[in-house]
Image (cartoon, grey):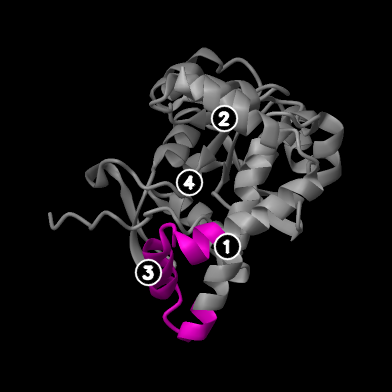
Amino acid sequence: MMSGILYWLVLKPISMLPYRGLYILSDVFYLVFYHVLGYRKKVVRGNLTRSFPEKTTAEIISIEKDFYRHFCDLVLESLKNFSAHPHQLAARFEHHNTEVLDNLHAEGRSAILAGGHYGNWEMWALSAPAHFRHRLMGIYKRLSNSYFDEKMRSTRGKFGLELVSTKETAEWLKAHQENLFVAVFAIDQSPSNPRKAHWISFLGQETACLFGAEKYAKEFNLAIVFGHLRKVSRGKYAIDYELVTKEPLSYDHGKLTEKMSALLEEDIRREPRYWLWTHKRWKHKRPSD
């Protein structure tokens, strides 16, 4: 009941605002989130300081402020997705090097598309199906609130992206082995069980990584493509697709995970303000055994 009221009386009306109105509201959100509430500022500051020990405090704070400005844009742009139309998305999100995916489709190859929580992945989810010849599937974690889980799924999937929960991923991949698909994996989330993680050095820190992208690529002999998300200007984004490999079985254990993470790290180091620093990425410590 309360979820429905919140959606129809607050979130939906916000989504109907023109983009210019959204960014005025985003500027207000920035003042509230950063200067008044200090939303997760301790987490963000700690993540940035450990990731860039060579930077001065002034440089860290500058990145931090830029991140919060982008984060507030991201929140409002994600709400806009409730009402966004294809022509609006086409004007705001560019897809480059799509021939990488077209060539795989022509060869009869399915693939994994790996990426991180960088730029605006929510806008990508709505704009991407128009650029794919493959069936497009995204993996997501169910929300505890069933009302907003349904709204999130219907919004992300309204232009063709099929959403599959993490618990149903293996079953879906097995059922669609004979189809041509691209399965989207976010590789920068923190694993729930550090004992099942693959441990690497990421942004100069010992980091637990999800192993699913590499595991399924090898199990089903899927090509791997990496999506380099970037922010072109306020409200404008782009993605560049890069072929990582068509031969996943040729890599030793863990090497594909390390390679994908290294590509994401390059993007973060180039423009750190656009990664999701509010995430408690390093909450796990490597088990002593």
Give the mark nearer the N terminus: 3 vs 2: 3
Quarter-of-image position of residue 111: top right
**Residue 185, horizontal then vertical, whole percent:** 52, 38
> What's the amino acid at mark 1?
Leu
Residue, disc 4: 187
- Residue neighbourhood size for the residue with mark 4, other residues' Cα within 10 Å, grouped as few (<14), some (14–19), many (≥20): many
Q: Quadrant of the C terminus?
A: bottom left
Inter-mark Cα distance, 3 to 1: 21 Å
- Residue neighbourhood size for the residue with mark 1, other residues' Cα within 10 Å, grouped as few (<14), some (14–19), many (≥20): some
Q: Secondary structure at mark 1?
A: helix
Quarter-of-image position of residue 180: top right
Inter-mark Cα distance, 4 to 1: 31 Å
Which label sits in the foreground, 2 or 1? 1
Could you tell me which residue is drawn at 29 percent across and 41 percent down?
192
Which label sits in the foreground, 4 or 1? 1
Could you tell me which residue is drawn at 80 percent across and 41 percent down?
18
> What's the amino acid at mark 2?
Gly
Give the mark nearer the N terminus: 3 vs 1: 1
102 relative to 148 in the view: left or right: right
Residue, disc 3: 46
Give the mark nearer the N terminus: 2 vs 4: 2
Q: Is residue 133 above or below residue 51?
A: above
Q: Secondary structure at mark 4?
A: loop
**Residue 54, horizontal then vertical, whole percent:** 46, 84
Q: Is residue 135 above or below residue 207?
A: above
Q: Which residues are magenta?
A: 32-60
Residue, disc 2: 138
> What's the amino acid at mark 3?
Gly
**Residue 105, horizontal then vertical, whole percent:** 74, 29
